[in-house]
Amino acid sequence: MFVKMIKEFFYVCLWSFLALSAGNSVDFYVSPDGNDYHPGTQDAPYATLQKAQDAVRAAKRSNQESLTVYLRGGKYCLKEPLVFTAEDSGWEMLPVEFTAYTGEIPIISGGTTLNLHWEIHRDGIMKAAVDYDLEIDQLFVNANCYRMARFPNFDPVAKFFGGTSGDAIAPERVQRWSDPIGGYLHALHEAMWGSKHYRIVGVEATGAFTLQGGWQENRGGDFDPFFRGGFHKDYLFVENIFEELDAPGEWFYDQKKKVLYANPLPDDDLNHAAIIAAGLKELVIFTGSQKEPVKHIQIKGLHFQHTKRVFMEPYERLLRGDWSIARLGAVRLENAEDCKIADCVFADLGGNGVFISRYNRRISVEGNRFTRLGESAVCLVGDSNAVRSPAVEYSHTLPQDEIDLLPGPRSREYPAFCMVHNNLMHQLGRVGKQTAGVFISMAEEITVSHNTIYDVPRAAICINDGCWGGHVIEYNDAFDTVRESGDHGPFNSWGRDRYWKTSYNGGRDIEPFAKERCLLDNYKTTHIRNNRFAHAGGHSWGIDLDDGSSNYRVYDNLCLGMGVKLREGFFRRVENNIIIDGFGGFHIWFPDCDDVISHNIFVSEKPYQFIRANPHCAKEFDFNLFYNDHGDITITGVDSDMNFEQWQAKGLDRHSLFADPMFVDAENGDYRVSPDSPALKLGFKNFAMNQFGVMKPAFSEELNHKPRSYKSVKTEPAIHSSRDSTPMQWLGATVKNLIGESEKSAAGIGREIGVLVMNVPSGSKAAEAGFQAGDVILRMGEERVDSIADLARLSQNRRGKSDAILVFNAVERIRMLQWDD
């Protein structure tokens, strides 16, 4: 004890001397080759971040203010996360910095270096005994991420998960596995709205097995804490199965026998390779309290790598949006203020990059690269305790006479005034598919600006709910999004807030006070402006303001191959956007919704596509410019299809024009219009075309060398349906096969299945049985109704009988039908 006191006294004296000689500034140094018994100087650095943290705390106690910890290059393998508390806080003008030494790359790793003796097993497979307790979730060999033994084998050009097959869980295959317990099943959600993941926990001789999991998303699968179903039966694969170890770059760890097997890549000699096993779930944690938050700490220039995947961790269902989430990140902040994560690299992580959880204020994430992540790049997620009248899950409608009518949050347990700026995000969602570059839920006034986001399975930017708005989404560049899912766009939001009823999905039961109450949660306007969103073929909803999203302004955006979708909300203004080969998708509008569609340029054959939406619900359609090579436009979904003249005859777009917008240089991405453009005469205003995405010179230079076409590709289904689209009369109603992305999205069904009820005249037999427009008939009694042919067949010889008919219209419902004698 006495020796320790002498050492601390010596270091305080040394730090005081250094501070006086350096203008009231103290620097500490850390190196993988250092020693924690050193004084932490440049010539005699510490070895660990924890020791440097202790030194900073001691220096603060001696009233030294400017404190910087320099990390020399090399790998720092953490045995536990580095935890910052209020004791580590800096000052407003003199923040504490943990930063990379100039020109060097310090790597903060959650992995364990494996030094093993490898020997031949068989068929090109090597094996090695592991002499210590270890759980291996990710394995890196010479910086390459090897894959758990899987079926089907990984194929980099396969659309989903690098290869999928329904045969992966066929009983005859399962029966080949000697001990599959501990294996994993990964699958898309049955409607392709994200993904579900399971652990195999039991198996029978027949090949049937028991699964645990499925809680990684918030749509379907009920609330069973052990198992939630609803996974896709074709888009799935299995891994961590020894018998599937048959391809180079795969591995399997027999934890019972402590033997690691690997099928090396051709150039890898395992006995001389650098091998790292991911160990930790998190690397750096900021954790304070609202009374004593962590303040003024900056992390700069560090590389974060090698964390475990988190898909089997507990997930929290986030209100009524589609997301569930594990509150984990390589860097996680909770109860922090005025902290910054800058110029770092987040790579080869099993989970999220940065997670800003619950109470946080003025957190900045800027200039970072996020790549090869299992989940999302940056998440900002508040606590449901801050929400007035919170509800969880899509179908959970709150009784309107019981909700809290005070606007805004109930407490301060949420992120606010934070910034995600100038980051490069790509190759995200390698495990989870309900992921994003930036995800926001239960937060206020978040700025997301100048980020470039591409190669992601779902949205680039997603807002899960209307709590509490005020966000600014600007100058971002997003492309190659929604690569492994469906019914989405590069920007997506939901607004299933306390005012929103599940029945609104079908346009039913709209309360007279819904318009007023839509602003209780989303009480501040969110601005989406000056972004470039591009989609190269297939279907995209573009800027997708889904299910109740309200109080948005969408303006000065360039949309290539996509447009804007507005569904079931109020107070949306879509103005001064350029939409090339996309469309306005207007779904299930509320009366007097106050939406405005004006001063936009649509280069599209079908610029407006309505689904169960009355255009006269909008406040304004006008001063838009339309153009295509055919000389006219087609408006769909309002009675029968109509041309521009017929549309204007309804009193809509009365001042709008059909004319060439006269773009400056569309071929090279400059969609400004020339001075003589008719768009300018309508009130359109040019906006800059050279400010999208990252501004950091190194990132910009890298992206300049990435092949990119700014010519649009039409938004349309990638595969044309083979189903018959001819309608028929049934019990006096008009019905047809459910076909296409628009009908699937409006119905809330992810597959072309069932029969869509188009129109139900009052007084018809269908109306008497309770059928409504928008119902999708899925089953009659115990028989499936996959198509209109099934419905016609099952309706024969039913005189005098009674049938329970299952329909889907926002939720599953039963219509009781009594057939006539």
Image (spheres, grey):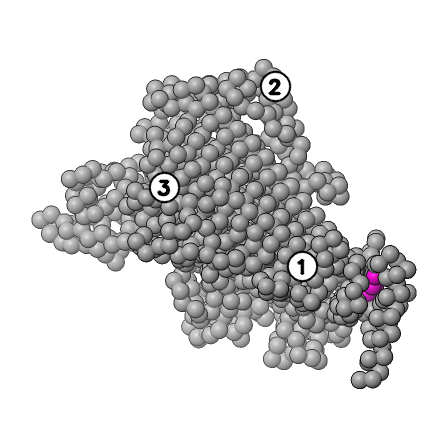
* Local secondary structure at mark 3: helix
**Disc 2 element:** loop
Residue 84 coordinates in the image, percent (x, y): 68, 65
Q: Which mark is residue 515?
A: 3
Q: CA distance from mark 1 to mark 3?
A: 40 Å
> Looking at the image, is mark 1 or mark 2 nearer the viewer?
1
Q: Nearer the viewer, residue 675 or 269?
A: 675
Residue farthest along the top direction in this orientation: 676
- Magenta residues, as a range? 26-30
Disc 2 target residue = 674
Q: Residue beneath label 1, please?
A: 295
What mark, if any, has residue 385 been given in the picture? none
x then y, percent, for residue 258: 65, 78
What residue is at 56 percent from the left and 54 percent from the top?
A: 415
Q: Is residue 631 above or below residue 402?
A: above
Disc nearer the start of the sequence (2/3): 3
Q: CA distance from mark 2 to mark 3?
A: 40 Å
Residue for point 62% across, 32% down:
710
Asked if marks 2 and 3 touch (Cβ < 8 Å), the reply is no
Residue 56 in view (yes/no) = no
| Amino acid bearing label 3 | Lys
> 416 or 277: nearer the eye?
416
